[in-house]
Amino acid sequence: MTGCVGAIDGCALKISRPRMSDVADPNQFFNRKGFYAIVLQAICDHKRRFLFGSATESGSTHDSAAFKASGLYKVSVAPSSTTCASVRCINENNLVLFLIHLVPSVLY
């Protein structure tokens, strides 16, 4: 894809079973693959370097829901299944560091 700087995907990061003293419901971390996990949403470039990462959701969370809970989604125009969204990352001097166009996928 011309102009594409990265690809996004989610994966389950295996963890030990959370303790009741740490979380309200440890079973939320048990995923469909049969182990306890947190969901990592990440964007990598063509050299496999991470451009963005978010690992805030429990293992039972679907990739699309984990993306919606991520910081990247929150700073973007919320994408729909038929439109693209643009994200401008701005530093403390209000300079645009980079611009990302999000292209939705029906598979995600």
Image (cartoon, helix red, strand yellow):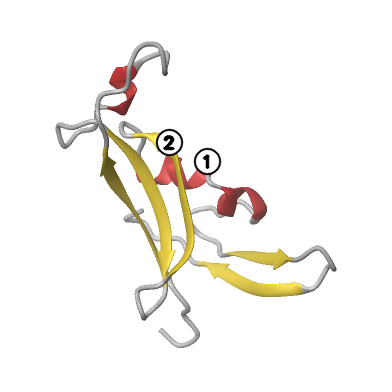
Q: What residue do we see at 28% from left, 44% from top?
A: 12
Q: For residue 31, what is the image quadrant?
A: top left
Residue 33 image point, x, y percent = 16, 37
Give the numbered dot on residue 50: none
Q: Which element is circle 1 on?
A: loop
Up/down of 101 relative to 30, above or below: below
Q: Earlier in the sequence, mark 1 or mark 2?
A: 2
The Cα atoms of the two marked residues, 1 and 2, are separated by: 8 Å
Q: In terms of image quadrants, where is residue 46? A: bottom left
Using the image, tell me which numbered label, if any, was put on residue 57.
2
CB within 8 Å, label 1 to label 2: yes
Where's residue 42, x and y in %?
42, 58
Identity of the residue furthest to the bottom in this view: 2
Mark 1 or 2: the one toward you: 2
The N terminus, quarter of image: bottom left
Query: Relative to the observer, which residue lies in front, 40 or 65?
Result: 40
Disc 1 crowd, CA 10 A, few/some/many (<14, 14-19, 20+): some
Name the residue that disc number 1 marks. 69
Q: Position of residue 90 (x, y in %)?
A: 74, 66
Name the amino acid type tagged 1. Ala
Q: Is residue 69 left or right of residue 37?
A: right
Left or right: where 26 falls relative to 82: left
The residue under the point 47% across, 55% down is 53
Callout 2 crowding tier (Cα within 10 Å): few <14, some 14–19, many ≥20: many
Secondary-structure class at tag 2: strand
Give the residue at x 31% y 34%. 59
Q: Amino acid at mark 2?
A: Glu
Q: How many marks?
A: 2
Q: Residue at x 36, y 53 (%)?
A: 108
Task: Name, please, the residue furthest toward the right.
Answer: 93
